[in-house]
Amino acid sequence: MARKYYDILQIKPDSSSEEIQHAYRKLALRYHPDRNPGPGAASQMAVINEAYQNLRDPPHQENIDKDAVPPSLEPARRDDLTSSILGAARTVILRSGWAVSHEDGSIVIFEAGNPRVRVALTDRLTGDSLRRITRQHRELASVMTVHIEGPIAVGSRMTVIDLMRSERHGALIPGEPCKSLLSRFL
């Protein structure tokens, strides 16, 4: 995990606080959605923010370095970029006042508002998984994912957000609070 943060900010593990901040600012100028309208800029900025948040505090940085596992010993899992994007998206959603209502290994459901609105976060989305998710969670307004595999049939009441490309598929984004949340990812 620690190695990933250093790689994202393009710095060495022995970098000073000033070097960490300089690297963050340089990347923020390049990828911030206000300056870079390109697809994926918002997702990349979320990954950069997560790395900076975890490395900017010296005591936290020492704990990360101490717990680091050599890359050859890390267990096989989702690629680092996918994990970073999902972690950053989760942080943004929780900080926006949404609460986790359901979580298992492949999907997290957040809810907010009255009447209740739900947003799903998952790493991969296929046509079958989208149908299964929408059957299980009736109030679902949107699914956010990093990878879309194959064609998906998005219903008239559903929005799918491709976090990797900052693209929307399906219906227009539903009303508040969903609209204000999802607009951050596009």
Image: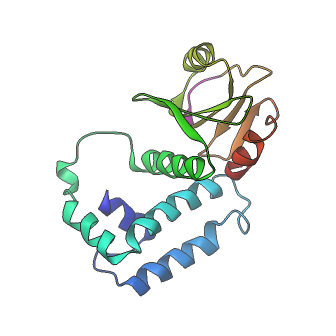
Which residue is located at x 66 percent, y 17 percent? 138
**Magenta stretch bounds:** 146-151
Nearer to the camera, 64 or 33: 64
The answer to whether residue 127 is above or below residue 122 is above
Q: How is the image coloured?
A: rainbow
Which residue is located at x 20 percent, y 56 percent? 69
View extreme (front): residue: 114
Residue 68 in the image: x percent, y percent?
22, 60
Residue 27 in the image: x percent, y percent?
55, 72
Decide if residue 7 is on the left or right side of residue 147.
Answer: left
Judge whether residue 149 is colored magenta: yes
Judge whether residue 80 is colored magenta: no
Residue 122 in the image: x percent, y percent?
52, 33
Q: Quadrant of residue 150?
A: top right
Decide if residue 63 is on the left or right side of residue 120.
Answer: left
Locate the N terminus by quadrant: bottom left
Nearer to the camera, 24 or 138: 138
The answer to whether residue 163 is above or below residue 2 is above
Residue 136 in the image: x percent, y percent?
57, 15
Decide if residue 40 is on the left or right side of residue 47.
Answer: right
